[in-house]
Image (tube, rainbow, N blue to C red):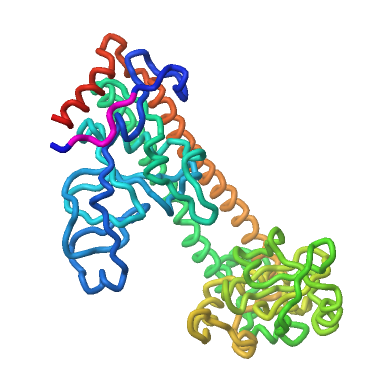
Amino acid sequence: MKKQKNAPQILTREEWPYEVPENWVWTRLLSGGAECLDKYRQPVNAAERKNREGNIPYYGATGQVGWIDTYLTDEQLVLLGEDGAPFLDAEKNKAYIIEGPAWVNNHAHILRSLYGNIGNLFLLHYLNQFDYVNYVSGTTRLKLTQAKMNEMPFPLPPLPEQQRIVARIESLFSKLDAAAEKIRATIDTFPTRKTALLHKAFTGELTKKWREEHGVGMDGWKEQTLQDVCSMKITDGTHQTPTYCTAEEGIPFISSKDVTQGYIDWRHIKYIVPSLHEELYKRLAPQKDDVLLAKNGTTGIAAIVDVDKVFDIYVTLAVLRPNKEQIIPSYLLHIVNSPACKQQFDEHLTGIGLPNLHLRDIKAVLITVPTLPEQKEVVRILDAIFKCEQKAKEVAERLLEKIALTKKAILARAFRGLLGTNDPKEESAEGLLKYSYHKEVS
């Protein structure tokens, strides 16, 4: 075999990043932990790959990005992002394992543990919990160079302890992943339940009991257009190119990008110069209880103006001002965000790349409108259920966050020898380190 590039390096106790058991040693990643096989990677652009399609996985910084017709490696290896990996996101993986025939591009480093497949798994978990802050560089796209990777400290336990650590991590992660999968499955059902609930709301099923209790029938339900229930002509925001300024100097200015989840997100809005505001506000002055509908971008999503605030809107938003003698603002909001309206919006989308809704099509959308008392009951039921659903969703999301933090804590303890698996009687890993080096150079 060819001589390994880097001879094993044992760090002095003063160089240790943190304490580990006495029979462990601290070394450097590429001079005691793994061999770098970047010479086997090669980029192939998408156009060329299209002409070389095959059944061999083509890998990049964070996973498989395509297929190709032949391979450059054929074994279990650990890939660590060189650039494009989420190095500073503690909850996301930076490394992953590949098996069998593969082709790796130049956005991932190819690593092979010096301690076999168990060593690869140990290496994988270590790299996914490592703090890369002082090892990556760049502004818009962080990069981990091979030189910096060579500086990374690596804790090396005896081989049996590596096996026990990997087994304990895999066992604990398996249980946590199973729990997370169930939680995600629950979260995934929320949109379906919401769709079903809105369907019941606007077909009269949701308030069937209410009608029975009040001695009324479905004859109070009417089919009307969106324009029919608005007190002014449905129109959109300014078509002028806005002149922006600072928040201290300007007037709030929102567009469809600020209406993404059924509410107005005021956190990242822009501001326009007061002189332009005066001109725009004469034409259209949005007010409380108006429903703002995204014409493009987040097309078909609506939000209600729930504050008394002076602001202007861009052409990407349409204003629906409810005639309160006919329709409750919250009822209008719910039905505009319902599947019944979305289907009609989708049927009239035009344009390539960024689909757009025309005002004439928005005005003509048909909705079902019951009496005001029944509208009030529909809104009451929907708001109560959606509030409970939102709380349940938030609880589920917090549980996922807790699972992610638990996994992080497990890894932190694992590479400090704190999982309760270490046997202090086992021979020091220093001998393993020297053995692996002599084996490589022999």
Residue under the point 73% across and 83% down: 240
Percent position of residue 326, x then y: 74, 79
Above or below, 107 relative to 149 = below
Q: Which residues are magenta?
A: 3-9
Above or below, 272 relative to 73 = below
Q: Number of labelled discs?
A: 0
Instruction: Left or right? Give the position of 141 relative to 424.
Output: right
Percent position of residue 118, x then y: 23, 32
Q: Nearer the viewer, residue 204 or 101?
A: 101
Residue under the point 41% across and 34% down: 152
Q: Classify residue 376 by image quadrant.
A: bottom right
Above or below, 370 relative to 206 = below
Residue under the point 32% across and 14% down: 23
Q: Residue furthest bottom?
A: 360
Percent position of residue 420, x then y: 36, 18
Q: Nearer the viewer, residue 162 or 438?
A: 438
Majority secondary structure of the magenta segment?
Answer: loop
The quarter of the picture where the C terminus appears is: top left
Q: Nearer the viewer, residue 174 or 194?
A: 174
Residue under the point 40% across and 46% down: 145
Instruction: Left or right? Give the position of 317 relative to 75.
Output: right
Residue 5: in magenta span: yes
The quarter of the picture where the N terminus appears is: top left
Residue 309: in magenta span: no
Percent position of residue 237, x then y: 72, 80
